[in-house]
Amino acid sequence: MAQNISDEPARLQSGQSLSAPTGIDCDQARLRLQATSVRMANAIQEYLSACETMHMTCEQPSTGGMARSLALESIDAEFPALVLEQAKLHRAESILRHARNRSKMTSSIYSFPPEILARIFCHAACHCTREETFLRVPLATSPLDITQVCRQWREIAHGHRSLWNHLDLVVADKNPTTYKYPPLALLPPRSQNDLLDINVRCYPSLYNRRESDDDSDEYEDESDESDESDEDPDLSMLSELYLFLRELLSQTRSLFLVFCGLQQHMLTPLANLCFYNPSSVLKSFQVQANRNMSALKLNPTIRRASSNNTAHQNFFLNSLETLRLCNTIPVWSKFNLGNLTELHLEAGEEWSITRSEFVSVLKTIPMLQSLSVDDLSIKKDTGWSSRDTIKLNELRCMACLDHRTDGCLLLAVTAIIVPGPKLVELTVAATLAPEKSRKVLDALRNFVNNSNITSLKVHDGTTGGCLFATQLGSLPRIETLKLGYTRFSNRTQLRTGSDQVRYIQNPVSINPDVPLWPSLRKLYLHVCTLEEAYMVQFLSLHSISSLYLYKCYVEGAHFEPGRPRPMASEVDLKYLSGVVPKVIHSRCRWTA
């Protein structure tokens, strides 16, 4: 069970090291080791001399009787002592080897300036910022662990509040007794009373339990959970987390919950915690559930005693500015989204919403500036007509990621949303089936051309990538274009599963008199296939100042059965420098 460590000794409260004595510098330790080594060498030499003397004495013919018996007893007594001393020497050797190896590993770290060390510490502590969200992380995530390494690290940690205003908590691991929450009394002075960012990772425990009924009218408060904690270690850990977060919620700026399994019984109490303890400083709320599992429901339960009293009705997270939900289905009626500026919805297999419901949700977010929908199933309903649209006047950037519905999500979003005057950035990813590609691309082009969008990112998720650049059509306002898995050629070749090559003709040829993208200045190509003659003709029609390339291929490169296509080298693409002033071959993938 996770426990608070406020009862630790006073020097832990002050951040002093528990792992090594303080006040001993490197020179003192070195001189002490050298002096002791000299004394040990002298003692061993004297011992060897004594052993040789005993050996010569035992070989003398005159030695016999009682003297010989006493000598043999002395020799026999030395063997256990030698074994014991050998173990001590092996222990000393192990300690010195560990010290040497540790010093070699950390010498480069200690050479960093304190500012760099502090950034390394913060990055190590912020596990939830990594892409591998659902992988297990070490339980020792408290900043107190850094302060216990040495005096230098303790001073650096104490001097940087960013290390203390981010907490990454781990719940329901295999050994629940090993994780300790940092003392609540230490956080305000260490973070200089700054607002906190709290990430909570919930892993499935080894104990089987029944999923709680999220739609129950009864609300289980913390006293009920405490009564069951002795019977269920999972609930015991949840109770400790609940009590810890309740004290910090009033000073929490961001709360990020990660669920790696079917843990509805953990999400509901945490949602209740936010629901019944409203905070004016909580600006960001994120729930990320594993998309390979069943969806979780974000539905705070209503206490029966207050359900009929409108004075006690509470909108969930009134102060929110950012809401990000992954495979987590919200009950929208319990949300107040009037202050929301960023909304991210990432769906699993079970989450769908009608067009009318989606319009109703967007109408409650007048200040929305950033919208992202990822694999959300938006279905047509009888109550929706083509006139039921919404114009988001404050929207600045939008992302529509559709990896599995053949562009249906993109068609729904472009039919529902009327671009406002501030929308300048759009990201689109779609798996385009051949029979729907024209309809989807027409909808995308009309949406872009009827807006003020100047930055567009398009990613074709079709296996092998069958989107030709000219199929995007005329985009007169686009200044920055990022394309993924796109073809720049008149004809492309694709390898089928049987290692046979089939050819696909580009349905839209280049118009040598009219550029498709007259305002384009920056072009990013990610895993695109390029034909030299085609690229030279196409780029010559445009005024592109910068071309960024990452893992591109040469059209027509030889296919070898059973082997991946070779990527184009800088030598293969050197011709691009003749038509574009600035060509950059990136080794790192560019982001939107």
Image: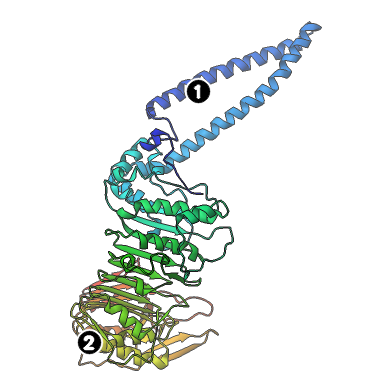
Q: Is residue 501 visible?
A: yes
Q: Residue 369 appears in which quarter of the rendering?
A: bottom left
- Residue 225 left/right relative to 57: left
The picture places residue 343, in percent across and down from the top left corner, at 31, 72
Q: Give the residue at x 35% y 76%.
A: 373
Between disc 1 and disc 2, the foreground one is 2
Circles 1 and 2: CB atoms closer than 8 Å: no
Q: Secondary structure at mark 1?
A: helix
Give the residue at mark 1: 37
Q: What label sits on residue 449 in the rendered view?
A: 2
Q: Is residue 407 visible?
A: no
Residue nearest the viewer, comparing 496 with 449: 449
Counting residues from the N terminus, which is met first, the one under dot 1 or under dot 2? 1
Q: Is residue 499 left or right of residue 379?
A: right
Q: Is residue 64 left or right of residue 462?
A: right
- 320 or 520, nearer to the observer: 320
The CA distance from mark 1 to mark 2 is: 81 Å
Q: Is residue 46 left or right of residue 371?
A: right
- At label 1, counting other C-alpha atoms closer than 10 Å, the crowd grade (few under 14, some 14-19, many 20 or more) is few
Residue at the image point whose x is 30% and y is 89% from the top: 443
- Asked which secondary structure carries label 2, the reply is helix
- Of the numbered discs in the image, which one, if any, rests on residue 141? none
Question: Disc 1 residue type?
Answer: Ser
Mark 2: amino acid: Asn
Q: Quadrant of the C terminus?
A: bottom left
Q: Residue 10, position in %: x, y? A: 39, 33
Q: Quadrant of residue 58?
A: top right
Q: Vertically, is 349 above or below 232?
A: below
Q: Quadrant of residue 59?
A: top right
Residue 49 higher or lower than 331, as above or below: above
Query: Which residue: 54% across, 20% down?
Result: 41
